Image: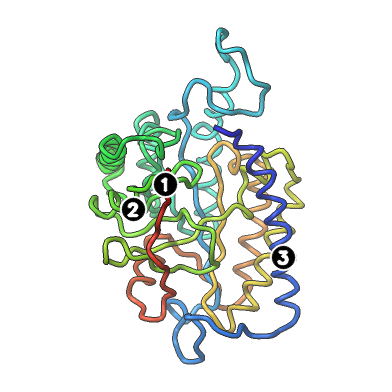
């Protein structure tokens, strides 16, 4: 499997180019020629909000394989990696508690994408996330690829992960985020069978949409590579917390302007071991305060967004997913 950092490096370049294009489009003050969500009369969001922001909290520590990537140089497999596990454990010991306090400070509710084995490793913390009003979403059984599993294995993994999350937190997940966003040909069918109503593994829009799964509507609540700490802070093109803050503000400003005439959503992602560092939390603190200072800004969990999208006749529709077979 290609190194995640190498993939992210190319994605960041594309994201930077796309962000520049968005800035130019916003500066022109021209409305789009067509959009399924463009309407002067329709309420774009509950409460007539102008822009919705959705934060993801990735709960992964304790579910990573022995050879999982880390900031350290690769180690010969014959020797134990004695330091990488501590990098992951920073998430449940320091990162998640710090982020939960930040969310409480601002009264913001988020979606936590929980890996089943991470929940099993840190049950008290996983339960605390839900106790504070946040959503527990599925993130598979292990923090490892699932697209290469057989259909039966994939189905079993998701079922077991959901059972763990429900047993520990009291909440059964209805949303899903795959490892590195990569699905198999059967992922959406399996999710639909198991009662999920949405997934986030799509980067094609800055608003929710609907995809048909065996003829039934399934919500897409888009994730992000741009506003994502694993690339921006821990990746090969790492930036400072101050630069991250400015990037978040720039993205917000363009989407907030567009939110006058179409449904807009801003997605942010914080990983337990990265987003919970003091520098990133400081940047997120300032950004949330900045966003809340603007009228018509709402923070929503992804299950709330999915249900809203499924209830609206004006939600953009996607064609069914198809995959070529070798």
Q: Quadrant of the N terminus?
A: top right
Q: Which residue is mark 2?
A: 188
**The quadrant where residue 251 appears:** bottom right
Q: Secondary structure at mark 2?
A: helix
Mark closer to the observer (2, 3): 2
Q: Looking at the image, which residue sits at the far front?
A: 326
Taking the image as shown, residue 228 lies to the left or right of residue 183, namely right
Color style of the picture: rainbow
Q: Is residue 309 visible?
A: yes
Front residue of this view, candidates 163 and 130: 163
Q: Label for residue 250?
A: 3
Mark 1 highlights which residue? 183
Q: Is residue 14 left or right of residue 208?
A: right
Element marked by disc 3:
helix
The answer to whether 45 appears left or right of 205 in the picture is left
Q: Which mark is residue 118?
A: none
* Residue at the outermost bottom position: 41
Q: Crowding near pointer 2: few (<14 within 10 Å), some, many (20+)?
A: many
- Label 1 SS: loop
Say which of marks 3 and 1 sits in front.
1
Q: Say if mark 1 contacts mark 2, CB within 8 Å.
A: yes
Q: Position of residue 19 (x, y in %)?
A: 70, 63
- Closer-to-camera residue (133/137): 137
Task: Name the residue at 27% across, 55% down.
Answer: 192
């Amino acid at each position: 499997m290609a190194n995640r950092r190498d993939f992210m490096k190319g994605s960041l370049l594309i994201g930077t180019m796309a962000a520049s294009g968005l800035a130019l489009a916003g500066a022109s003050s021209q409305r789009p020629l067509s959009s399924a969500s463009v309407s002067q009369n329709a309420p774009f969001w509950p409460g007539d909000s102008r822009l919705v922001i959705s934060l993801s909290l990735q709960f992964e520590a304790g579910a990573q394989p022995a050879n999982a990537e880390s900031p350290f140089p690769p180690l010969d497999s014959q020797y134990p990696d004695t330091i990488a596990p501590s990098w992951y454990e920073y998430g449940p010991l320091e990162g998640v508690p710090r982020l939960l306090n930040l969310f409480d400070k601002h009264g913001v509710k988020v979606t936590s994408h929980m890996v089943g084995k991470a929940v099993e490793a840190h049950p008290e913390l996983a339960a605390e996330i839900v106790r504070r009003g946040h959503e527990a979403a599925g993130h598979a059984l292990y923090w490892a690829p699932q697209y290469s599993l057989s259909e039966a294995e994939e189905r079993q993994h998701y079922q077991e992960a959901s059972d763990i999350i429900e047993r520990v937190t009291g909440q059964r997940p209805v949303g899903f985020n795959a490892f590195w966003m990569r699905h198999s040909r059967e992922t959406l069918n399996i999710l639909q069978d198991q009662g999920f109503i949405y997934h986030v593994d799509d980067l094609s829009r800055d608003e929710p949409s609907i995809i048909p799964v065996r003829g039934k509507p399934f919500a897409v609540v888009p994730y992000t590579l741009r506003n994502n700490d694993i690339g921006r802070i821990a990746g090969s093109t790492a930036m400072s917390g101050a630069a991250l803050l400015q990037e978040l503000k720039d993205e917000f400003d363009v989407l907030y302007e567009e939110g006058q005439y179409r449904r807009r959503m801003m997605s942010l992602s914080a990983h337990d071991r990265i987003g919970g560092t003091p520098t990133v939390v400081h940047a997120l603190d300032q950004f949330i305060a900045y966003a809340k200072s603007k009228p018509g800004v709402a923070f929503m969990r992804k299950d709330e967004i999915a249900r809203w999208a499924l209830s609206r006749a004006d939600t953009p529709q996607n064609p069914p997913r198809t995959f070529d077979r070798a």
